[in-house]
Amino acid sequence: MTMGDRIYLFDTTLRDGAQTQGVDFSVADKVAIARELDLLGIDYVEGGWPGANPTDDAFFADPPELRNATFTAFGMTRRPGRSAANDPGLVGLTSAKCDAVCMVGKTWDFHVDVALNIPREENLELIRDSIALIVERKGEALFDAEHFFDGFKANPDYAMRCLLAAYEAGARWIVLCDTNGGTLPDEVESIVRAVAERIPGTSLGIHTHNDTDNAVANSLAAIRAGARMVQGTLNGLGERCGNANLVSLIPTLMLKMGYETGITADGLRRLSHVSRTLDERLNRAPNRHAPYVGESAFAHKGGLHVSAVEKDPASYEHVEPSTVGNRRTIVVSDQAGRSNLLARFREIGIEIDAKDERINTLVDLVKRREYDGYAYDGAEASFELLARRGLGEVPDFFRLQSFRVIDERRWNARNELITLSEATIKLDVGTQSVMTVAEGNGPVNALDTALRKALLPVYPALEGLRLVDYKVRILTPNDGTKAVTRVMIESTDGYGNRWTTVGVSANVIDASYNALHDSITYRLFRALGTGTPDASSDDR
Amino acid sequence: MTMGDRIYLFDTTLRDGAQTQGVDFSVADKVAIARELDLLGIDYVEGGWPGANPTDDAFFADPPELRNATFTAFGMTRRPGRSAANDPGLVGLTSAKCDAVCMVGKTWDFHVDVALNIPREENLELIRDSIALIVERKGEALFDAEHFFDGFKANPDYAMRCLLAAYEAGARWIVLCDTNGGTLPDEVESIVRAVAERIPGTSLGIHTHNDTDNAVANSLAAIRAGARMVQGTLNGLGERCGNANLVSLIPTLMLKMGYETGITADGLRRLSHVSRTLDERLNRAPNRHAPYVGESAFAHKGGLHVSAVEKDPASYEHVEPSTVGNRRTIVVSDQAGRSNLLARFREIGIEIDAKDERINTLVDLVKRREYDGYAYDGAEASFELLARRGLGEVPDFFRLQSFRVIDERRWNARNELITLSEATIKLDVGTQSVMTVAEGNGPVNALDTALRKALLPVYPALEGLRLVDYKVRILTPNDGTKAVTRVMIESTDGYGNRWTTVGVSANVIDASYNALHDSITYRLFRALGTGTPDASSDDR
């Protein structure tokens, strides 16, 4: 361990992580995740492979503005038989909107012989030319040495010459990849030590996969051997068994090994949030057993142990949970819940005295709602409304009398299957009773349209409101379609503000309505404060 | 690495694994899992803590007969202030129906001072007496040295004396426990090396937790340092972040490090089965990304890559999948080329000539469907139906004429909001036309119920069909509620088979119907092959 040494963090969630079976990022997902990574303090955000698929093309056509992170594109060394400057793939990369390019190339003699089927010397030229072109046109190139550990074991001399070709051509980082994930930590450590005799550790990175459950340990072994950059993904996404999990690595590097990274102590406290946000985006249940950030990571069971833990947590917990934005959970005590709730109130700007008796009522309410399936972790707007309603701050901008939604699917005269959705809704707005009907291309769309048709004349502030994401999850999957349904809706006001609300019900339409109701109420509360319909009508 | 050395495997799934939040073993579960572990070739099966809870009492009152494994009970060293032979807990253990007892005791001076609150010398006596009594009455004792690594870092001399007290009293194994999971692999390795200078490695075991994502690596580090026994759990069950995952460790020890265990090559081929059986028992979806045994562990994506893998799998896969009872899978996705699709066909048993012109039609169809939002990566049953339909193998078991779903939400007479869903469906089954109506607690549940009400009399094979998961995702989130909706449904036939189907539509009800239709068709195709409704009616 070298205290204070700087480790560079390279995130490939949006590129290698996108290879995960069952994961399918939209452009909006990529934008949101890139921003989270940048805010966290990651050094390199690899956005994808421009030219490889329509999603990455669209993402790179209009990349997010990042504060600190180096926005990086992935690509491949040039093909044999033409110069780097005439290789269409490579030239495409040089014009991509990015700050750096990470180029993958072969270093295992066997793959050069069999997969590329070119002389080994020519592969060195491919690497040299491609890196040089990127350095010349983009400023910064990185080299991902594919199958490096297998290559080094088979032919250390040749594998080393591939690395040196990239290094001498000006690559900022030489990244040693355990592409098929089969190398064990002691092998990684000794091979990286050997490489570090020729290329300084401050130019060496490590890229591992979890096929033997050692991706994190392999990354740490390479760092012990001198590497100073690590590639990984959030929550260990990645093909097969996943990549090295940055969420596990970061706290170990910073809190246990004393390394510096681009992440501050404040940034580190965002880690649990970042990890959960990714899962919400992917509509997956977060892994409650995840190291550092899982819901159970600092769970203590009841009984004698708890008082011992409370007396001296440090001797039962390997790190302080709040350092990574997580919390201790003790089954028999709700103290953790109370202080967590107070902390969250402060976060959203609700000033309330710690001794205020309404806090206990709110703690109970949050617990009961979460027991029922509400997830306030990813639905901050609904949480804020819940809290402010508990404090009597949120007016009823409107009240539902009833709704009815009809979906009909049938064959039309031209033998096509067509489906129609129609929603009827009856609301009280102030002293008025309003009834509207609307069609939509689905029940939620019809309901949303009817609702806004009723409200817009009274509340012009709803003009720009738009739903940008809609997610449904079943909470007790063993009951199949009979289970409780949770809907999360992300909305925008058309001015760049976004908020997420949650609704829960056995009925998906009901749950959707609840989330829609919160979304509209939140927008009105932001626009009008505690104003009444009459006050707002001045805006018209 | 010392080729051929024997490593002893100690499974604590039924004791430490039972601490997992959300896991609750019945006695029947314990019996079934103990038998699986024994068949696999595990050396020690720790069944629980007799005297600690009714389940463990019942399990030890009538333990399963094991072929080879040493059936082990867990317990604690005697309390201060009385002799071992007069300690009720310890005496209970000596009469438990088991072959060995694993005793946990303290080795960290701080916990002796604060938690036990006794002189440090007295703790040595507790250990010595308790181990001696178990050795005398049961023949074999093991010593779990709680918080050993923290203890050794704080006071190496005292921690070592605790181990020696147990060793000299006759403990067969001294197990070094990283109880709070905070120790890193290099620390584990150096501390175990230090211990191995005083106690032979053939008497040392290792017990780790996954709080830094290093439980497997820590176990391997201890083995490199000389330990010859490892404690862990199936699938890494355990409190907080779990224990060391034996399912990951076993193949690494046997296939990569060349160690002998009690498991034969045939036994190792049962590993994937054992891992999945545990999840079935716990009614959890298996982790498809689990090292070695996960469904995705040997999955390959991407066109060019797939033809390379088929040419030479060994250079892309770190072990041969069948050695652990798993298999290679070729993932179909929008990157799919012809070779992916052909490989996938072979996997699901579709024989088709590589030159068959229908393949191009199918490639186009898959691409078009994926462009529309279908995700066949994750919905294998829908993919198989798509392929077999393209080859004319799947009969129309039923044909939808029309459906109508009504959801109504209103205030009832008692001022409660209530919501009702009702579905009407009209189908052709063979030459019959069937019309049914059903209520549900949501539109999909109502539709599913009406559909099965219509089909069950004709197709008794649908009797056990049940939905186990239902997921909805919006695919072009920038269109909000107007976007296209993708529904994925996971179903079971009630006999342990699970399959996933997908439906896409602008309308969530439509998309759900499409996924339901595929799910039922897949079940009928599996049960009846290309049989018609008339053929199947023989089953009634």
Image: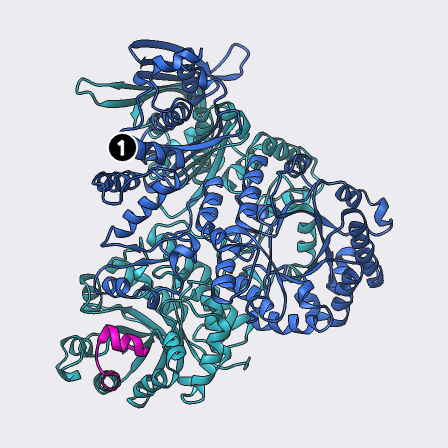
Chain colours: A blue, B cyan
Q: Residue at x 23, y 53 (%)?
A: A333
**Helix, strand or loop under label 1:** loop
Q: How far across and down, in percent of the image, does residue B429 sit?
A: 42, 24
Q: Residue at x 70, y 54 (%)?
A: B308
Q: How far across and down, in percent of the image, does residue B415 sit?
A: 20, 20
Q: Quadrant of residue A222?
A: bottom right
Magenta segment: does it hold A11? no
Q: How far across and down, in percent of the image, does residue A263 sit?
A: 54, 54
Check the image and report above or below for B225 versus A1.
below
The kind of residue on which mark 1 rests is: Leu
The chain to which mark 1 is attached is A
Q: Residue at x 45, y 84 (%)?
A: B194
Q: Residue at x 52, y 56 (%)?
A: A245
Examine the rendering and report whether any part of residue B122 can be seen: yes
Judging depth in this view, the residue of B391 and A486 nearest the camera is A486
Q: Quadrant of residue B86?
A: bottom left
Q: How far across and down, in percent of the image, does residue A530 sit?
A: 34, 23
Magenta segment: does it hold B114? yes
Judging depth in this view, the residue of B46 and A456 nearest the camera is A456
Q: Quadrant of the N terminus of chain B?
A: bottom right
Badge 1 is on which residue? A391
In this rendering, position of residue B127 left or right of residue A325: left
Q: Quadrant of residue A350?
A: top left
* Segment tinted magenta in the rendering: B103-123
Check the image and report above or below for A453 versus B41.
above
Examine the rendering and report whether any part of residue A422 can be seen: no
- Count neighbours of disc 1 (C-alpha within 10 A) and say few if under 14, some if 14 to 19, many if 20 or more: some
Q: Quadrant of the C terminus of chain B?
A: top left
